[in-house]
Amino acid sequence: MNPRVPVVSVDGKPLMPTKASRARRWIKEGKAIPKWSKLGIFYVQLTKPAGTNTQEITLGLDPGSKFDGIALVSKKHVLLTGMIELPQHIAKKLEQRRIARRNRRYRKCRRRPARIQNRKRPENWLAPSQKAKIDFRLKIIEELKKLYPISSAVTEDVRFNHYKRRWNKYTSTAEIGKSLTYSTLKEWFNSLELIRGQETAASRRKYQVKKSPKKKERSVWSHAIDAVVMAANHLSINNFSIPNFYVWKRFQYIRRQLHSFKPVKGGIRRRIGGSQCLNFRKGDIVIWKGKLGRVAGYMENPPRLSLRTFDIENRRFTQSAKPQDCIRLFNQRIMYACSYFPQKEI
């Protein structure tokens, strides 16, 4: 089965996806305009008003601490599968910032009084590490909601023994973040179904699929397969085929610092961090000598850019790109990769 192409109306409302052949015909006849979303999904926008009748599309979500599985399923087809790589190392960065700030304040005035009265956290305080993961997860779902008329959602309700693992406390920021995710999904969609892990395993046995034990594996069989079977079981689909698989990851760069923590030879602290790179910004996608690259940094003498590959790996391939030789296309905050593999029905 070929993947279905998302369709949006003239005013940007999502409609039911269509066949790739029909989308090509619409573009050729001038009835639609080809576009790309921030998630790397190709879609078409109609140039004339059309009907707004839609069918039920269910979002399947398998949340995790480092990786999420996601899938969109209609009553006839699996429309999309994907894996979300959640942001990491947030707590470590905040700790480094805290140490640098305290040292700087001590150097300025070592007799500065401690300010404890304004350090009280609110009742529903959410840890920055949890907030970064939840924000990115909801951002991906929000972008999918712009392309597909999603009407319902089903997600696995992750259980956690807070009293045993969280210093004898009955709640944690993970529970607060989970509640925030569920409340947002209830606002966006008509219904939200929560299921347990045992039910997900039963759905895998029903459709006779196996989950990969390697959690880091960028494959539909690692996390996305749970989201697929949950959504398929919710719509009572007998069999299905998986047309595509996406991987989404947030582009992270070092924030601007006053100077590097460790000085080089001679006691000189070099410049570090920031988003500005000469006349570009970090995350800009450029064309350099016929190649696509992502701006990751710059050197001053002589002025040149450091470019990384335009894929999910984000590997550096040059540090000598002249700014005048680079053509800026767009700025990318969400890195993505896609693989298509038409398969027989499951």
Image (tube, rainbow, N blue to C red):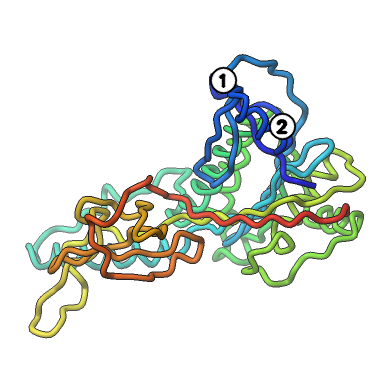
Give residue 149's position: percent from left, percent from top: 67, 29
Tell which of 111 and 241 is nearer to you: 241
Mark number for residue 209? none
Compared across the picture, whether 306 is left or right of 132 comes to: left
Disc 1 to disc 2, C-alpha distance: 15 Å
- How many C-alpha atoms fall within 10 Å of the one at disc 1: few (<14), some, or many (≥20)? some
Name the kind of residue labelled 1 in the image.
Answer: Thr
Residue linked to disc 1: 47
Compared across the picture, whether 308 is left or right of 160 comes to: left
Lower sequence index among marks 1 and 2: 2
Give residue 248's position: percent from left, percent from top: 55, 54
- How many C-alpha atoms fall within 10 Å of the one at disc 2: few (<14), some, or many (≥20)? few
Q: Quadrant of residue 31?
A: top right
Residue linked to disc 2: 22
Name the kind of residue labelled 2 in the image.
Answer: Arg
Q: Is residue 112 above or below residue 327?
A: below
Q: Is residue 172 above or below residue 185?
A: below
Give residue 198's position: percent from left, percent from top: 83, 57
The C terminus, quarter of image: bottom right
Tell which of 42 and 177 is nearer to you: 42
Q: Quadrant of residue 267?
A: bottom left
Q: Is residue 340 above or below residue 143?
A: below
Helix, strand or loop at disc 1? loop
Most extreme residue toward the front is 28
- Residue 176 in view: no
Helix, strand or loop at disc 2? helix
- Residue 335 in view: yes
Q: Residue at x 51, y 53 (%)?
A: 133
